[in-house]
Amino acid sequence: MAVKVAQEPRTPGPPSGTSAWDSWLSDVPGYPRLQAAGEMGRLAVRVLLAVFTPPFSWWGECIDETALAIRRCVLPAVLAMTAFGIGLACVFLGGIVRLLGTADRLGGGINLGFTREPAVWVSLMILAGVAGSAITADLGARKIREELDALSVLGVDELRTLVVPRVMALLLLGPILGFITLVTAWVATYLATPIAFPSQVITPAAFVDTFRAFISPLDLINFLLK
């Protein structure tokens, strides 16, 4: 006659591969976000190593992705910077210089202002919202269609083939798009200033003179680095 032995219920242990001392981390509020940030950092290190490690077969795809991203971002960047530049320069900054009686200094203020702050975050906003979302959607669609699994089966390095070219394309696109937005802001305010201040003596020559007096190579270098 078989005798059944009562077994005490076991308490669930830590997951496989997880030490007992850090098993409680998954219950800490905010830990999933910290874990996602750590995975992003690890991916960044892998991409950086792949960039400087031969073979350098990602250059062709990088140029194609850069050209595609420029075509996607130029029109939104120009429209956004034109509207924002005219509104900020002619409405906000223009009202200040009108009260101070220094409308002839508007060109220099526009140069300093747009070079140091607005043109930077407007270009980055377009870069992330247009080019970044397009790349994310493309990689997500490839994942849904199981193209990534097919590349893995074929022995193709997914990181070097798909991720590195797009990261380098965004890195190249940043300064190019920033320069486009900055020039757009300069041209838009230059054309709109005489219309916005008809009662003030702001000639194109005076605008350009003050603009050239305030321009600095260090500001441009700082802008490109941002």
Image (cartoon, rainbow, N blue to C red):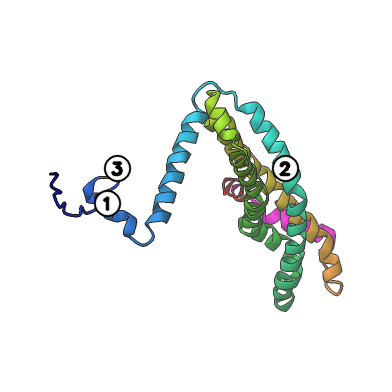
Q: In this rendering, does residue 209 appear at all?
A: no
**Nearer the viewer's eye, disc 2 or disc 3?**
3
Q: Position of residue 203 (x, y in %)?
A: 84, 63
**Nearer-N-terminus badge (2/3):** 3
Q: CA distance from mark 2 to mark 1?
A: 46 Å
- Total numbered labels placed on residues in the image: 3
Q: Which residue is mark 3?
A: 16
Residue 70 marker:
2
> For the residue labelled by badge 1, is the local secondary structure a helix, a strand or a loop?
helix
Q: Residue at x 36, y 62 (%)?
A: 29
**Nearer-N-terminus badge (3/1):** 3
Q: Position of residue 30 (x, y in %)?
A: 39, 60
Q: The residue under label 2 is which amino acid type?
A: Ile
Split into 4 quadrants, where in the image is the N terminus? top left
Q: What crowding class fits label 2: few (fewer than 14 Cα within 10 Å), some (14-19), or many (20 or more)?
A: many
Seen in the image, is 102 located left or right of residue 27?
Answer: right
74, 14: nearer the viewer: 14
Q: Residue furthest bottom?
A: 99
Tell me: residue 13, above or below residue 150: below
Q: What crowding class fits label 1: few (fewer than 14 Cα within 10 Å), some (14-19), or many (20 or more)?
A: few
Residue 21 in the magenta stretch? The answer is no
Q: Position of residue 51 (x, y in %)?
A: 52, 30
Q: The residue under label 1 is which amino acid type?
A: Ser
Q: CA distance from mark 3 to mark 1?
A: 10 Å
Q: Which residue is mark 1?
A: 23
**Nearer the viewer's eye, disc 2 or disc 1?**
1
Q: Residues in magenta? A: 204-218
